[in-house]
Image (cartoon, helix red, strand yellow):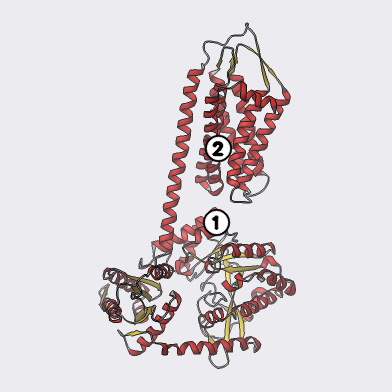
Amino acid sequence: MIKVLSCIATDHHYGLLSLATLVCVLGSVLTIRLYARVRRTVGVQKLNWLFLGGAIGGSTIWTTHFIAMLSFRPSLAHAYEPILTLASLGVAIAVTTLGFAVTAMRKTGPTIELGGAIVGAGIAIMHYMGMMAYQIAGRVEWDFTYYAASIILGIGFGALATSRVARPVTRFCKYGGVLALILAIVSMHFTGMAAITIVPDPMIQPSAALIPDNLLIIMVMAMMCLMLGLGASTYVIDLHSSHLAAERFRHLSLHDPLTALPNRVAFGEHLEDIIRRQKDDTARVAVLSFDLDRFKDVNDVHGHAAGDAVLRTISERMSQVLGEGEYVARIGGDEFVALTSNFFMKSEAKTFASRLIAEIGRPVEWQGQTLLVGTSVGISLFPVDAGTPEELLAQADLAMYRAKAAGSNSIRLYEPSMDDAARSRSVLAMDMRQGIERNEFELYYQYQNNSVTRDVIGFEVLLRWKHPVRGMVPPMEFIPIAEKNGFIHELGDWVLLSACRQAASWENPIKIAVNVAPAQLADTNFPNRVSEILKETGLDAARLELEITESGIIADQQHALHIIRQLKQLGVKIAMDDYGTGYSSLSTLQNFPFDKIKIDRAFIDGVTSNRQSAAIVRSTIILAQSLDIPVLAEGVENEEHMDFLRSEGCLQVQGYLFGRPMPLSEIDHVVNNTPLLLPAPAQAPERDGENAVAA
């Protein structure tokens, strides 16, 4: 160590040594960033990044070496043999590329460190080829202890550099990778320099055909500027392209693909922002809720193409008449919401509603047909009626139902008397608690299939409630109530226990997917409860998949991540449900260890007719493939959906094409190899996934 430091302190020019250090740092930062790109990409793109990373890494090693050699100050005449000098550059690039290729072959395993060791060996090979090109008026004597130590240091720090990038334990590991590569280059070079002793010999003189220092420094500086400039510009261009793609994906995720209007998530964001920015105590915000009257008739008589044309035309018309402070969004089907913050009197909010009603009521011409729809609008006011976006939307819905009862084109402001429905929900909540005791709840199952072989690969577990008085209660009615009053914990526990118990009794070990409500995921004891259920029922943890949505993790991501990691330690799989309906999905996928992505049915429905839906689904599949996360598409209802998904590489599907949700008795032939019995006619259930515990 003393000899190495003495070599640096006494035998080198500090100015050039500082330049070598700068080149090494900048080149190492760029090389590690490019190597990270290699690991995150696939196909031709991976090869492009591999070549660029190898070229920049090899050039950094070569440039650092020769600038450091130029800073070396022997008192004897010296020069550089041109062929070996240039050949050492080619070797540095080739071996670095090979090392990155080896370490990027697999996501895990010893090849990560092996590839890094090859990069470190490449540093040593380049160094000693460069030393062979170094011609001086004297004999070079070698200390093989330092010689061996330099090679070991290069290989060791090279392996550490790739390990820190590929096996991060903290968010600072990427900087550790850069530091390790710098140490690999620097420690190898100066330990190698300490291994030589130059003995003057007047009989040895450098040839005049060799490269002198002043010419070499021009070559090295040109190479440095070219390679670092090329690498940096390519990286910046890619970074900009990725940013634009992320922005476009976010825009697609926040807008309805059919009408280009903002969707539910975008409206919620906007409403929260408007409320937060209200400073005038006399100002008001009006939330309008409305859907289309006679829209179902248009679909039934003229087909969905006509219905889509109506939705697009009406959306365009409403957008054109919006004024300052006004906003409209489509939140599903023929359902719309709007808001205005540019008013002070209730009559002004009604005027806005009348303007929208007038646009909706205008005839729509489609293929020679005149299509007519209408609407009724419910209005709730902030802060008069409610203080939160959720309450405003709920009260606007109540007012809309009152308006529809009064006839088409009606407008109704929210009134407290409309909360009778809330009292009805309270009665339903009390009945729900007794429903478990009276065995009124039943599990239904829906097929999950391989898109290539069409084999059943799993079931999503769904919930039904057969009320003794009301009959079949839709999950969209009782699930929100259970979430609001906290009963979702007990109900979700019953579903998980019952599903695991039933699945454990099957002859065929088919996997099951159970939805987890946000409140369950927030429970610190939830992983322990899952472990208890698995032990009690005897179900293999690998057969259980828990589905969560972004709403379940967005409130407290650190807590949710802690819970999910505990669940994965049990062997349970974690799936992200309803992907694409939230704007934070990209960052969520990066931060959470998901085993599967489920694309929401809203996007699958339009993949064959809408370019935006197809773009979202295609982008999701490509993103998931780059992260090695399987994708399952929900809402697959026809062969056109299947053809699109297969062509894009989606291997798992779920939807009406393969079967509606059904009770255990109707899947017995699949799970227990019993003879298939034709099921008795039953009421059409809700669409897949809408009856899950956390739907």
**Residue 5 x %, y %:** 65, 27
Type of amino acid at the residue the image marks with label 2: Ser
Crowding around mark 2 (Cα neighbors within 10 Å: few <14, some 14 to 19, many 20+) is many
User: Residue placed at 62% from the left, 81% from the top?
Assistant: 677
Q: Give me the disc on residue 28.
A: 2
Instruction: Check disc 1 and report its element: helix, strand or loop.
Output: helix
**Residue 18 x %, y %:** 54, 29
Q: Compared with residue 275, is residue 183 higher up or lower down, i.e. above or below?
A: above
User: Residue placed at 52% from the left, 47% from the top?
Assistant: 43
Left or right: residue 224 compared with residue 438: left
The quarter of the picture where the N terminus appears is: top right
Q: Compared with residue 329, is residue 241 higher up or lower down, i.e. above or below?
A: above
Type of amino acid at the residue the image marks with label 1: Gln
Label 2 or label 1, whichever lies nearer to me, is 2
**Residue 178 x %, y %:** 58, 40
Q: Among all residues in the image, which is located at the extreme top? A: 203
Q: Quadrant of residue 149?
A: top right
Left or right: residue 77 compared with residue 319: right
Q: Which residue is mark 1?
A: 590
- Does residue 36 appear in the picture of this structure? yes
Left or right: residue 65 compared with residue 305: right
Q: Compared with residue 75, is residue 147 higher up or lower down, i.e. above or below?
A: below
Q: Are marks 2 and 1 in contact (CB under 8 Å)?
A: no
Q: Judge by depth and name the residue closer to the eye, 478 or 456.
A: 478
- Give the mark, 2 or 1, whose residue is nearer the N terminus: 2
Q: Judge by depth and name the residue closer to the eye, 117 or 390.
A: 390
Alpha carbons under labels 2 and 1: distance apart = 24 Å
**Residue 106 x %, y %:** 62, 47
